[in-house]
Image (cartoon, rainbow, N blue to C red):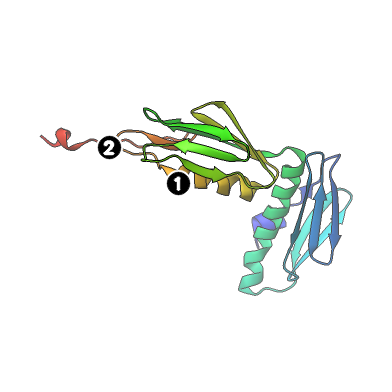
Amino acid sequence: MSRIGKRILNVPNGVELTIENSNVTVKGKLGQLSFQFSPLIKITYENNEVKTERLNEEKTTKQLHGTTNALIHNMIIGVSKGYKKEIEIKGVGYKATLMGNKIEIIAGYSHPIQIEIPVGLKAELPKPTNIIISGIDKQLVGEFAANIRKIRRPSPYSGKGIMYKGEIIRRKEGKTAAK
């Protein structure tokens, strides 16, 4: 049995959860999220506790059990606390600027790259080399941060590039070390 699927989720005060068929809607102080789950998983909500149960023992149902529980957990945290990813830009001349609902990144290419901020996310630039992405949808925050990082992945030789804050880049020796 899935350990994550068996876990009982506590809904904090100020968060409202409604279940209609297999559609779960979560409302909180930061916003509202809803998701249509598989009908193979039974979702119950009583006494500020959410439980998920499998309706059969097929492989696909077992796979959905833990995933459903984790997604509901992420929705509850998203509307109550929110999610945040911090990105650092390292390199001579590498920087980012905020232009309305777009971020323009200069990262060593012949042209600046513009990436549009998705609806529901907020981007802040406390410094030209730091980007803070925040929102209530964990998947959307992580995907947008990954798309920004993909513009110029960190180099293991020079250490330059776009990386998550606190990410450790394993450095490699260059050709001169072989002598």
Residue plotted at (57% across, 46% down): 144
Q: Give the image location of residue 61, x and y in percent.
A: 66, 70
- Residue 123 horizontal/vertical position (percent): 62, 36
Q: Secondary structure at mark 1?
A: helix
List the residue tagged with mark 1: 150
Work out whether residue 62 or residue 38 is closer to the camera in this orientation and state it.
38
Q: Residue furthest left?
A: 179
Query: Within 10 Å of the Cα at label 1, are there few (<14), some (14-19), or many (20+) other Cα atoms?
Result: few
Residue 9, horizontal then vertical, whole percent: 76, 49
When the figure is inspected, residue 6 is found, relative to residue 90, above or below; the finding is: below
State the separation of the CA atoms marked 2 and 1: 20 Å
Q: Position of residue 13 (x, y in %)?
A: 86, 39
* For residue 146, above or below residue 88: below
Q: Is residue 165 visible?
A: no
Question: Badge 2 local density, few (<14 within 10 Å), some, or many (20+)?
Answer: few
Q: Nearer the viewer, residue 96 or 16?
A: 96
- Left or right of 121: which side holds 46? right
Up/down of 95 relative to 140, above or below: above
Q: Give the residue at x 72% y 44%.
A: 78
* Quarter occupied by residue 24: bottom right
Q: Amino acid at mark 2?
A: Lys
Relative to residue 11, is residue 171 drawn left or right? left
SS for dot 2: loop
- Residue 172: mark in rendering: 2
Residue type at numbered disc 1: Lys
Query: Looking at the rendering, which quadrant does residue 100 occupy?
Result: top right
Look at the picture and state if 8 lies above or below 134: below
